[in-house]
Amino acid sequence: MKKVVMITGVVGLALSLAGFTSCGSTQVAASNARVEDSRNKVPEAKTDEIDKVVVVDWTDRTMGEVSAPTWLKNMRRGNSDTFKEMWKVEPNRVVKVSMATGKTEATAQALSRAGFAYTQAAELNQKVIGRVGQGLNDVGQLEALYVAASETKADMTGLREETGFFQKVRTTNAESGQKTEQFIYYTVYSMSKETWDALCKKYLMDVMGGANLETATQKKIGALFSEMKEDSDKKEASKQAEEEALYKAQMARLEAERAKSNADAAKANAETAKAGLKAKEMDAQEAQTKKAAEEAADLASFLM
């Protein structure tokens, strides 16, 4: 029976790390394999062929934290906005996450911290292959690019560790029923935008120093940093404009609410004053009526 492992949510993303960092001829072979797979599609697995995976423990579980918080899901998808808002991280800082697995929480945590530079190198590797590799028709040249990008290391400096999060995962084998457990640890770091730009530039320059990279390819890699930085700057400028517009809208709304509150207060004061005046008029009328009654009584007494 063919066994397939089904993992959902963050756990699935975590356990797929091994397939995230293929390199060299392995990646080229994998690319060719994908072409073959599209011709001979594998039938979907039946329910009884799928391993059951559950998260049985996690950070701050006893305090009501969920096993896969929204900020972590978003971080794994490349969106750090929710995390920045929750952890009060400066908007201009770049936030990245590293993850690793181990038999104990301590082991997974240590591997997560140690593997952060490797994780960022893998991310930059994807950017190089994705943007530069598309324009290469020569197999040997593409192979050289894969090797150079995959073997280049990212030297991480200027980092600030923000937080960590662990998950204890239990997997039940669909075929044998055997249960195994392991820990996944996520470490979140932040750095200044200048640090991230410098890291990207150094990585790309190191790739250009790789063997058998022709001048045309090196020029494409050199231009890639400018593209990445320009995209980042545009995103930052757009975000700042959006935040400024939001701030102005909030101030306008507060001003409108303040004006309405003042108008309501003025209206209430006017109604109070009107009610007081009316009360005075009623008191005057009552005094006049009382005086008339007293005069009538005096006249009646005189006539009698």
Image (spheres, rainbow, N blue to C red):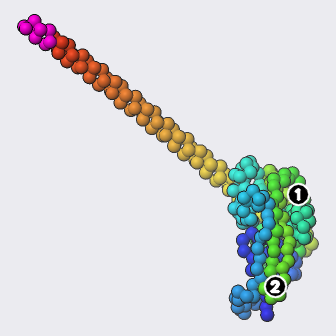
The secondary structure making up most of the magenta span is helix
Q: Amino acid at mark 1?
A: Met
Residue placed at 75% from the left, 84% from the top?
50
Q: Of 199 and 243, which appears nearest the observer?
A: 243
Q: Tell me the residue that label 2 is attached to.
A: 177
Q: Classify residue 82 as left or right of residue 170.
A: left
Residue placed at 72% from the left, 58% from the top?
64
Among the 4 quarters of the image, the one containing residue 268: top left
Q: Of 258 and 244, which appears nearest the observer?
A: 258
The disc at residue 235 is none
Residue placed at 73% from the left, 59% from the top?
65
In the rendered image, residue 207, in percent from the top left (x then y), is placed at: 87, 67
Residue placed at 85% from the left, 74% from the top?
181
Foreground: disc 2 or disc 1: 2
Q: Amino acid at mark 2?
A: Gly
Q: Of 294 and 228, which appears nearest the observer?
A: 294
Instruction: Answer above or below: position of 295 versus 276.
Output: above
Q: Classify residue 1 as left or right of residue 79.
A: right
Q: Tell me the residue that label 1 is attached to.
A: 156
Q: Classify residue 108 as left or right of residue 243.
A: right
Instruction: Answer above or below: position of 181 versus 265.
Output: below
Q: Secondary structure at mark 1?
A: loop
Among the 4 quarters of the image, the one containing residue 72: bottom right
In the rendered image, which quarter contains the C terminus?
Answer: top left
Residue 42 falls inside the magenta stretch: no
Span highlighted in magenta in the image? 296-304
